[in-house]
Amino acid sequence: MTLLAPTPAPACAPAPPRRTGRLVLVLLGCAAVVTAVAAVQLLRGEPDLAPGDLATALSGADGGDAAFLVRELRLPRVLLGLLTGLALGAAGTLLQATFRNPVADPSLLGISQAASLVVAVSILVPGVVPDLGLPLLCLLAGLGTGSVLVLLARTVRDPVRLILIGVVLSLLYGTLISVVLLLAQDYVRLGNFLRFTTGSVSGASWTTVGAAWPWLAVAIPLAMLSGRALNLLGLGDDLATGLGMKVVRARFLLLGLAMLLIAPVVAVVGPIGFVALLAPHVARYLLGTGNAHQVLPASAAVGAVVVLAADAVGRLAFFPVEIPAGIWTIVVAGPAAIWLARGALRTAAGS
Amino acid sequence: MRLVAALGALAALAGCATGGPAREATGGAAAPGFPLTITDAAGREHTFDAPPRIGCLWFGCTEIMADLGVPAHAGSEVAIEDDGPFYYPAGPPAEFVTDFTDPEDWARTGVEVIMHRVPETPENDALEQAAPVFYLHHPSYGESSETGVAAYRANLEILGRLTGRTEQAQAALARFDGVLDGLRAAAPPGAAGTTVAPMFSSDDGTYSVTGRENPFCVTLAENGLGQCVDTGDDAEVNAEAFLALDPDWIAYQVFADESWTGRVDPVWSRLTAVAQQQVYDAGNRIYCCSLRGLEHALQEYAHHVFGPEAGIPAPGPVADFDPAASPLAAA
């Protein structure tokens, strides 16, 4: 087992091995890291709090400044980071299985850029996009792009070509975003959008958590139930069809689910890069299996760890200056993504 | 006779092609001090036989030209429309360049020099096809010898020499010093201890604050008018750290039809400045780019922060701000 290989199940092979004990260990490990990072985020800041003060603030007994900092600023930020990571981690697994491509990622496939274009227009040219709420608009933009990719996936089965199509779509949206930026006259709005493009949870509040939560509360549990469909797709389209799966419809549904995970995240915190790409690979590596039933929760948990850790570094490394979490995920995960892409291209060339 | 008429017609056409009457705005007959050899902020040497027709790519240039009492021959969209530059009463440049990156567009206007600001970038080299690019100083960008308020002063002197209007340049410098005198005289006791946060508007609950090295902040501190909160360089500051700084005043810099009154986030309502309504919409003139822009920002600050007892009127919109008519300058 390598970190690179998605380990598709061989045809006519028995179901991928269930390693429940390992899954529990991975989830417990991730939970421990999440708890530790969350504790640091809740305790450190201006001012630092003693553990006793934190407990008092969380219990609701104290309504003072510490309670305000913890309940209104630090806790929503931790929760938003947690939700973002869970969603991106799960979405990465869905996308990679749906497109049967180990480097599938919302950014590489143009999905994040489509949503970013919507956000760019809404920030920089107010009044142009209909007032349906950013999560819904991002969902529609992402679904449009994803649908093009799913339809193309019926004829273009080469994973590298599919990624290239995604990259072209990504460039197209990037160009359109540049046009919007060039037309924008307002430097503050421009600054707001540029900050958005890096992906940051620094503006977290209960309002932003509330904007993302209803979508993710539906999408994350649904994603956890899609393991069987992902495993069938992993067998290949012909075998999946032979086993009674309507492959195209399943892909559309899974893609829609991935969009439901990605859209509210992009709308609220921006496109945090590479989490969706790396989390599934780390999960498979830790689990030692590609069984989607197990990879899905593990990938979500790894995503949560990555986003929370990136946000903690971004918040505390140069305090009080904020460095967006998206910068750190790119710094850390970018080189790893190049490594992954190298492996994928080598595999494709070999086939 | 026909030849003379034809030459006359050609001359008239040539005049139209190069902007004709507007040439008198900044170009024209030889002036004292020419030919002039002058080094720009990027260290490039330029020689002019006569005052050149000036094209302003950067709005700091447009504003300085107004201080010299003459419009630029041409201005880019950036220099004319964005942020509402101060060109009262000289008025806007005669020629408008829609795409400031397009040498052809600049060549059409007949400018003889294009005024930009440091840093020098390869992208601007293409503009040299239309006219030499002259780099002015910027208070914080690039690596010019003059930064902060000194950059504004140096730019005024440079453009004064280029236009042959050194007296007007000196008058504008003296006016600025007069404004500082007026502000010091009007400042109430304890003004030096007043803290202000010049922050950029945001609708996502974040706090981006102008650094203390900004000319506005430096001028406040050096003249005992107040002090900007210390957040390091221009950056997004952690919201709870901003709450801990809790400035007495917030100068809320907006670029469009926005206002701090529309801002809703948990920290905002807990700030002393917000609770005491000590927040003002500062337009966009705090961070940059000329003495008259700085004068507008300082008068706006003093009008709000010094209180009605100081009797400093609001400077009004930038479009018709006349620093020479400011009561501070008169004082």
Image: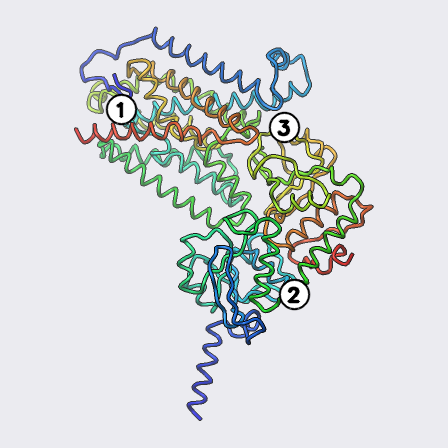
Left or right of residue B231: residue A12: left
Q: How is the image coloured?
A: rainbow
* Residue found at x 49% / y 14%: A35
Q: Residue B290 appears at what percent x and percent y?
A: 61, 54
Residue labelled with disc 2:
B168
Left or right of residue B225: residue B109: left
Residue labelled with disc 1:
A246
Q: Marks 3 and 1, Cα distance to the nearest angstrom?
A: 49 Å
Q: Are marks 2 and 1 in contact (CB under 8 Å)?
A: no
* Numbered disc 1: secondary structure: loop
Q: Amino acid at mark 1?
A: Lys
Mark 2 closeness class: few <14, some 14–19, many ≥20 residues within 10 Å: some
Residue labelled with disc 3:
B266
Q: Residue A256 appears at what percent x and percent y?
A: 37, 28
* Numbered disc 3: secondary structure: loop
Q: Quadrant of the C terminus of chain A?
A: top left
Q: Residue A7 appears at what percent x and percent y?
A: 25, 19
* Residue found at x 30% / y 34%: A149
Q: Are marks 2 and 3 in contact (CB under 8 Å)?
A: no
Q: Marks 2 and 1, Cα distance to the nearest angstrom?
A: 80 Å
Which one is nearer the viewer's eye here, A176 or B226? B226
* Residue found at x 28% / y 34%: A163
Q: Chain of mark 2?
A: B
Mark 3 closeness class: few <14, some 14–19, many ≥20 residues within 10 Å: some
Q: Is residue B152 visible?
A: yes
* Residue found at x 47% / y 85%: B8
Mark 1 closeness class: few <14, some 14–19, many ≥20 residues within 10 Å: few
**In the rendered view, would you say B154 is above or below B36?**
above
